[in-house]
């Protein structure tokens, strides 16, 4: 969430928010960089800055919870950690060493993205409450921060070890044995690694990532992580490009990747590269489910935990509903008019804001 503060002109700054004086004083005592609102002013500690607020800026802050972390820059602030949400992230970069044809980030955004400074990341982490429930470490490709990522992992392990973490990576960096060894020694105890597997061999996988050698690196990374005892979540992003060989991907997992924590089948988010390449990659949720359900059943029969992400319930057979999860970030969720009449709307995760119009006329309310 981005908020505007047009009178803020103190440059880059990270601080936690307190709604009232009691919490503000506690934060000050605990050594936080923090700020509060007093008489239409932002008051910062320990800097002592006072920034005038407009009425609409003051109102916007009433929707933000205590201990939320703001990343200020001149004229605006990004709510980096939302204390009211269980879906927070440490964002490293939009850059990636793969170029997946169905990525929801565009080539332009990736090329123009910077990489977060490790000191800024550590400052943000130092402001996080130790009882936070879940943090996703994500990008782009987080390992493009190079060995600084191990400094981040070590900080989390030493200071915030009770939080559940999901690291989203293509796994290629962990094909390097040195990286895999440092990874094993530094990660917090409750970390799961989420890695996409787009194909069953170099031709099929690399054809989607558009990065030669990525399949072999990803498979080596997966096996190194398995050897370390870390939990792995395989992510199969379902598109028209791989729908014809999903079963072969399942066979590869069964044969070579025993010990995987969970396999998730992921519905497309049609933004960025995915939207640009719509004709090549889009397959609607109802059609694609019919073509993947036997692979899901096969994995379950072989003892794998399986989840289904981003699929509305009306596109999935009722017998598979227990595998469906509400996986879309709150602000991205959309429903069609038909959904208003659905008896399962509250249980359904909806559709992406960039995707739901593509399903118009293809879904029916569950009665």
Image (spheres, grey):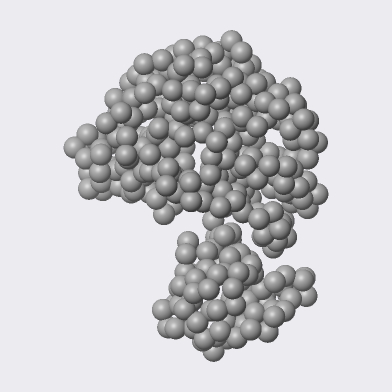
Q: Give residue 281's quadrant in the image.
A: top left
- Residue 163 showing in the rendered view: yes
- Expressed as whole percent of the image width and height from the top left, the position of residue 110 reads 48, 46
Q: What residue appears at the point 70 percent right and 44 percent down from the top-left corner?
A: 149
Farthest residue toward the bottom? Answer: 39
- Expressed as whole percent of the image width and height from the top left, the position of residue 78 reads 52, 64
Q: Give residue 73's quadrant in the image.
A: bottom right
Q: Give residue 143's quadrant in the image.
A: top right
Going by the image, does 73 lie left or right of 187? left
Q: What residue appears at the point 63 percent right and 70 percent down from the top-left corner?
A: 13
- Residue 162 showing in the rendered view: no
Q: What residue appears at the point 22 percent right and 34 percent down from the top-left corner?
A: 362
| Foreground of the two, 308 or 345 | 308
Q: What residue appears at the point 61 percent right and 13 percent down from the top-left corner?
A: 256
Farthest residue toward the left? Answer: 361
9 above or below 177? below
């Amino acid at each position: 969430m981005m908020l505007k503060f047009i009178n803020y002109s103190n440059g880059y700054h990270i601080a936690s928010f307190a709604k009232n004086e009691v919490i503000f004083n506690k934060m000050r005592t605990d050594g936080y960089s923090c700020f509060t609102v007093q008489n239409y002013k932002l008051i910062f500690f320990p800097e002592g800055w006072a920034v005038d607020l407009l009425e609409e800026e003051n109102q916007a802050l009433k929707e933000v919870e205590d201990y939320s972390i703001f990343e200020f820059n001149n004229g605006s602030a990004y709510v980096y950690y939302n204390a009211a949400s269980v879906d927070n992230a440490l964002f490293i970069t939009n850059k990636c060493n793969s170029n997946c044809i169905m990525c929801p980030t565009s080539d332009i955004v990736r090329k123009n993205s910077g990489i977060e400074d490790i000191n800024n990341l550590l400052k943000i982490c130092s402001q996080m409450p130790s009882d936070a429930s879940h943090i996703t470490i994500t990008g782009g490709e987080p390992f493009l921060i190079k060995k600084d990522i191990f400094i981040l992992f070590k900080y989390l392990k030493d200071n915030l070890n009770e939080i559940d973490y999901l690291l989203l990576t293509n796994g290629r960096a962990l094909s390097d044995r040195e990286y895999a060894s440092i990874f094993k020694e530094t990660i917090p105890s409750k970390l799961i690694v989420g890695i996409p597997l787009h194909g069953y061999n170099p031709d099929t996988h690399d054809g989607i990532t558009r990065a030669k050698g990525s399949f072999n690196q990803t498979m080596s990374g997966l096996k190194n992580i398995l050897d370390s005892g870390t939990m792995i979540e395989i992510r199969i992003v379902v598109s028209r490009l791989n729908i014809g060989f999903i079963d072969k991907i399942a066979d590869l997992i069964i044969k070579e990747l025993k010990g995987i924590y969970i396999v998730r089948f992921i519905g497309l988010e049609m933004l960025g590269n995915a939207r640009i390449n719509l004709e090549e990659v889009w397959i609607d949720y109802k059609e694609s489910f019919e073509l993947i359900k036997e692979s899901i059943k096969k994995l379950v029969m072989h003892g794998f935990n399986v989840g289904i992400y981003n699929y509305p319930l009306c596109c999935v057979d009722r017998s598979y509903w227990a595998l469906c999860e509400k996986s879309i970030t709150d602000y991205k969720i959309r429903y069609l008019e038909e959904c208003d009449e659905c008896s399962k709307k509250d249980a359904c995760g909806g559709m992406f804001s960039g995707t739901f119009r593509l399903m118009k006329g293809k879904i029916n309310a569950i009665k």
